[in-house]
Image (cartoon, rainbow, N blue to C red):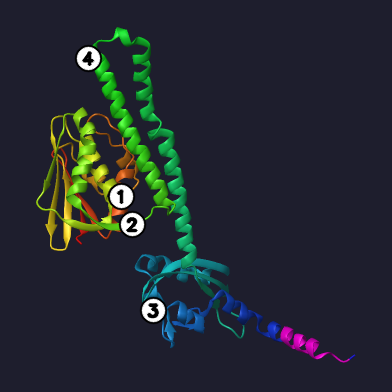
Amino acid sequence: MNETPAAYMNKKLVEGLNENSLELALKALNAGVWSWVAGSDSVSWNDISYSLFDQPKGPVSLDTWMSKIHDEDQLRVSEMWERIPAQEGWFEMEFRINITHGIRWIRLSGYFIPATEDIPDHATGVMVDITEEKYFNQKLKDANFTKDKFFSIIAHDLRSPFTSILGFSRLLNEEYDDFSDDDRKMMIKQILSSTESTFQLLDNLLTWARSQLGRTTFNPETFEIENLIVETLNQSIPQAKIKGITLKALVSEKTNVMADMNMIRTVLRNLISNAIKFSYEGSVVNVEAVREKERITVSIKDTGTGIEPKTLNALFSLDEKVTSVKGTANEKGTGLGLILCKEFIEKNGGSIAVTSKVGEGSKFSFCLPVR
């Protein structure tokens, strides 16, 4: 029976696919092919390999190949390459290479084939770009870390302050008449302090969670930074009064900034709260704003406990050593406040820094662009 035109075309298509299936598969994977004769300095690449390595076409030597590999991976790749002739069969390695616009991750798979009568010892294989895979895995790792930290804070840091609140509340409720006025005032003071710190922790926790989920809106506007500083200081007076701390605003001139006001309010609230937390009773916390050309620098300075150098280097990360530091009245913290501060200031085109000396106090400063 004669084949129909459609059947004939389909047969030819299948034959073509069978003949070129390997080439098509490699193109679909965007895989580079390489081969190397053991003991030689020359390496053969296909077109995709040149593209992966951001390399112009031409002779490729092992030295050329190694020169593209990231400095931190060169020794590992070099040692792996030397072991290839000693291990028959499959091998695989992952490494970074330097390209024109940054770093690219490569997964190299290969097979070593011992010499025969016609062919010398050689290795051949493929290379694929796994940059997106590495990026995704890191995002997944960060997400798991965020989740674990979130539940850790809920389980411990958010639960712990309620022990103090519930304890003193029960005493006042059940044995109110047995205590003197001074005892009752002390208990109420402790309840207030624990409640305020717990509220701020909860607020930071919810803000941080929204930020991690990408649900924090960014709405820059023009506003006077002086007014926001005074407003935030006034809101912090109750916390400062508990320790007899004086809050001062030192603003040389009214200055408009272009930023998200809610984000900057969160930054100021956290930095002022931290200054109070680590200040001694009866001390002073100064908030200063100084304009420098097209930027304004806001500094929050205290004369409290100060920060140890090893802690200073990890302040803006969720490090356990940082989160376990307590204030002068044993106030607890999680480190979330400073994480938010850094994230929000950088989101608004600014930067944040800290200087500190143990026993003398700390100075947190952030700068913002002026409108």
Give the mark, 3 or 1, whose residue is nearer the N terminus. 3
In the figure, 99 relative to 282: above or below?
below
Q: Tag 2: Cα neighbours inside 10 Å, few (<14), some, or many (≥20)?
A: few
Residues in magenta, as a range? 2-15
Quarter of the image containing the C terminus?
bottom left
Amino acid under disc 2: Asn
Q: Quadrant of residue 18?
A: bottom right
The residue under the point 28% across, 32% down is 331
- Marker disc for residue 219: 2
Quarter of the image containing the N terminus?
bottom right
State the residue position of label 1: 262
Of badges 2 and 3, nearer the viewer stands 2
**Gap between marks 4 and 3 measured at Cα:** 80 Å
- Tell me if label 2 and label 3 are in contact, CB under 8 Å: no
Q: Quadrant of residue 11?
A: bottom right
Amino acid under disc 4: Asp
Amino acid under disc 1: Asn
Give the mark, 4 or 3, whose residue is nearer the N terminus. 3
